[in-house]
Image: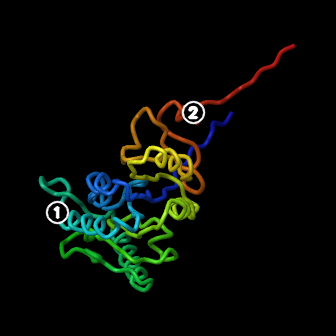
């Protein structure tokens, strides 16, 4: 007898920041949160859609925080961000930067390999990218945060659901009704509202669409380890 299959296929975490007071909370929790693991954690926040009214201030605050990150050996005290996994990731990031610039993107900070021995890439923030650019349609898996504004709720949900990935998503708002709607309308296996803490032992971890099948952890995670059997006797 064969058990079930649970698969995790990745997918960058996308963040929605609303103008109704979500900016400060998002900055406090996000300000560089994607960058310290060098962007190499599935589901971590990476693409930020910020409502137009607060977009400029959010980007400025994020860039300022990214500029304070100390890059180096992660085993040394005081280091905030370590290297990429191998040289192939450096080449992938350089290719991503070239494509982003061709797509009209603006490098607000970083964008290059660090001038040090090892596979280090600078903490990077990109703005003004088109939706069809490589960075906006694929999982960069590197220390880059993508910033784009949105106008209203409908646009925020549309861009959140436009890609065939759905591992993790996040939203920041002080409006309780909007928070409930976002949790319902965003197509993702995990959604964090006013928090990036979506992975705890008692909760199911998994994505939908092309970001995976099934869940691990929590009670739901036991399903893939079990075989449901029905016996009928007359």
Is 219 on the left or on the right of 93, as rendered?
A: right
Q: Residue at x 23, y 60 (%)?
A: 81
Q: How many C-alpha atoms fall within 10 Å of the one at disc 2: few (<14), some, or many (≥20)?
A: few
**SS of the residue at dot 1?**
loop
Q: Residue 165: which quarter of the image?
A: bottom right
Horizontal and vertical percent position of residue 6: 57, 44
Q: Residue at x 48, y 33 (%)?
A: 218
Q: Are circles 1 and 2 on residues that touch, CB within 8 Å? A: no
Depth check, front residue: 44 or 26: 26
Horizontal and vertical percent position of residue 174: 38, 48
Disc nearer the start of the sequence (1/2): 1
Q: Residue 50: which quarter of the image?
A: bottom left
- Relative to 105, residue 79 above or below: above
Return the residue at label 1: 70
Horizontal and vertical percent position of residue 145: 35, 66
Return the residue at label 2: 225
Q: How many C-alpha atoms fall within 10 Å of the one at disc 1: few (<14), some, or many (≥20)?
A: some
Q: Residue at x 53, y 41 (%)?
A: 215
Between label 1 and label 2, give the one nearer the viewer: 1
Quadrant of the drawing holding the C terminus: top right
**SS of the residue at dot 2?**
helix
């Amino acid at each position: 007898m064969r058990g079930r299959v649970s698969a995790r296929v990745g997918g960058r975490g996308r963040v929605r920041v609303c103008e109704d007071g979500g900016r400060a909370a998002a900055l406090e929790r996000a300000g560089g949160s994607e960058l310290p693991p060098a962007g190499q954690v599935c589901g971590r926040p990476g693409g930020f859609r910020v409502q137009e009214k607060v977009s400029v201030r959010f980007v400025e605050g994020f860039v300022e925080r990214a500029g304070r990150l100390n890059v180096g050996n992660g085993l040394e005290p005081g280091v905030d961000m370590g290297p990429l996994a191998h040289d192939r990731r450096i080449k992938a990031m350089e290719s991503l930067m070239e494509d982003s610039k061709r797509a009209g993107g603006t490098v607000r900070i970083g964008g290059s390999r660090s001038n040090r021995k090892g596979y280090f890439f600078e903490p990077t923030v990109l703005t003004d990218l088109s939706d069809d650019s490589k960075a906006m349609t694929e999982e960069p898996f590197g220390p880059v945060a993508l910033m784009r504004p949105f106008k209203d709720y409908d646009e925020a949900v549309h861009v959140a659901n436009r890609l065939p990935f759905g591992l993790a998503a996040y939203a920041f708002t002080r409006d309780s009704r909007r928070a409930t709607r976002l949790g319902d309308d965003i197509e993702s296996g995990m959604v964090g509202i006013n928090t990036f803490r979506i992975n705890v032992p008692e909760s199911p971890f998994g994505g939908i669409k092309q970001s995976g099948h099934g869940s691990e952890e929590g009670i739901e995670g036991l399903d893939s380890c079990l075989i449901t059997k029905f016996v009928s006797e007359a």
